[in-house]
Image (cartoon, helix red, strand yellow):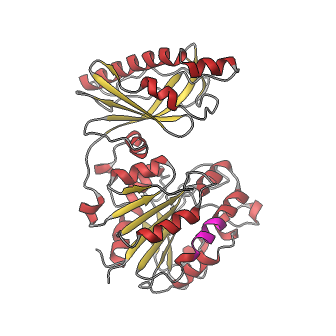
Amino acid sequence: MKQKILFIISDGMGDLPSKKLNGKTPLEAAETPNLDKMAELGQTGLMHVLKPGVIPHSDEAHLTLFGYDLKKHYIGRGPFEAFGLGMHLKHGDIAFRCNFGTVSKGMVVDRRAGRIENVAELCKKLDNLKINGVQFLVKPGTSHRAAVVMRGKGLSDKICDSDPNKEGAKAEKVKARDKSKQAKFTADTLNEFLKKTHEILEAHPVNLARKKKGLKPANYLLLRGAGKMKQVPDIKKRFGLKAVCIAGAGLYKGVAAFVGMKILKVKGATGTPKTSVKAKIDRAIKELKSNDLVFVHVKGCDVFGHDGNCAGKKKFIEKIDKALKPLIGIENVLVAITADHSTPCSRKDHSKDPVPVLFYGSMIKADSTDKFSEKKAKKGKLGVLHGKKFMKLMLKMTGKA
């Protein structure tokens, strides 16, 4: 019988030994009886998600692990963010990641507008503006974030960002990155849009109220990650998999939606350390009855890694482990657990270090591993893997190749 696949990515789980944890990584130091049991009964290994020596970005890493070729199928971060917010993109649309920021006299004062909690009311005034025959769609994300989509003829994604990515710098004027008419037209139209939206936001009641309270106004759109939408073969056509996604953060929903996964809403599932990992796993087990692949994304480890919080990361790994208890003894399911990249607390950023991999299921022959950790995974039967072959390996192990 062909097995189902439960594919769990613990974002940024990999790490390096820390003096704060007596020379152990958070994964090594954590009490993980369920992960260790699966490692004992399954197989482990290490994986370079992109290539050895390359630091993965999350969108590139996920697309690769889903079995897609970055050279053929990668379209840029912007469209993934838009997909993650539930926007329906058409072929040729140009999409951007967006921050509502605070700009004064052309200079970026705050890239997050004082961590404004909600920009939905601001987006309403900007959505569906038309300039030079181009329609602009604006949808709010979490906190200060949003997605912006340009829809029209003759557009190009070969343009620069308006976000300088640092405070105290000048808000960038969008420029073409090649000499095409399409790139120049797109840049000129986008600059007009940014000017008009700045005027609207300056006079918006939300920002007038913020100024009265001494808060920073969300008066400027900082755009980055331009990408042009194109269709790719969905995961059903490509691998014959009926697949669903359970995630809290928009980016991961976006990549999953791009490849044709159905995005499920799960109460308590967020993109923060407060997420209910238990709710995600419990829903995943139910969804395995009617789907070939259930993808679960858990963000917390990455957050603690970026904060340099080893103790918090260790504790969150223990939270994950506790939620995985119902998987022990599960039948007709391949459980695949890994990370999209390592986020060492000592670096507070992604690193090129390989990530641990665990395969567990009734059809998996156990190797000699007795614990799930970076150090132990080096000796696992899976050896050293490469992300571009990960999906095919899962399919092979479940008889779906």
Residue drawn at (28%, 56%) of the image: 234
> The C terminus appears in which quarter of the rendering?
bottom left
**91 up-or-down from 104: above or below:** below
x and y, in percent, of residue 215 in the image: 67, 23
Q: Is residue 288 left or right of residue 356?
A: left
x and y, in percent, of residue 219 in the image: 54, 21
> The N terminus appears in which quarter of the rendering?
bottom left
**307 up-or-down from 160: above or below:** below
Residue drawn at (61%, 51%) of the image: 303
Closer to the camera, 123 or 24?
A: 123
Q: How many numbered marks have been drawn onto this rendered protein structure? A: 0
- Asked if residue 349 lies in the magenta stretch, the reply is no
Closer to the camera, 127 or 273?
A: 127
x and y, in percent, of residue 139 in the image: 43, 34
Looking at the rendering, the stretch of residues picked out in magenta corresponds to 318-325
Query: Could you say which quadrant of the image residue 104 lies in?
Result: top right
Instruction: Confirm whether residue 108 shows in the render.
Output: no
Instruction: Confirm whether residue 30 shows in the render.
Output: yes
> What is the chief secondary structure element of the magenta stretch?
helix
Closer to the camera, 243 or 181?
A: 243
Residue drawn at (59%, 54%) of the image: 302
Residue drawn at (41%, 62%) of the image: 387
- Asked if residue 319 lies in the magenta stretch, the reply is yes
x and y, in percent, of residue 374 in the image: 59, 69
Q: Is residue 177 left or right of residue 327?
A: left
**14 up-or-down from 321: above or below:** above
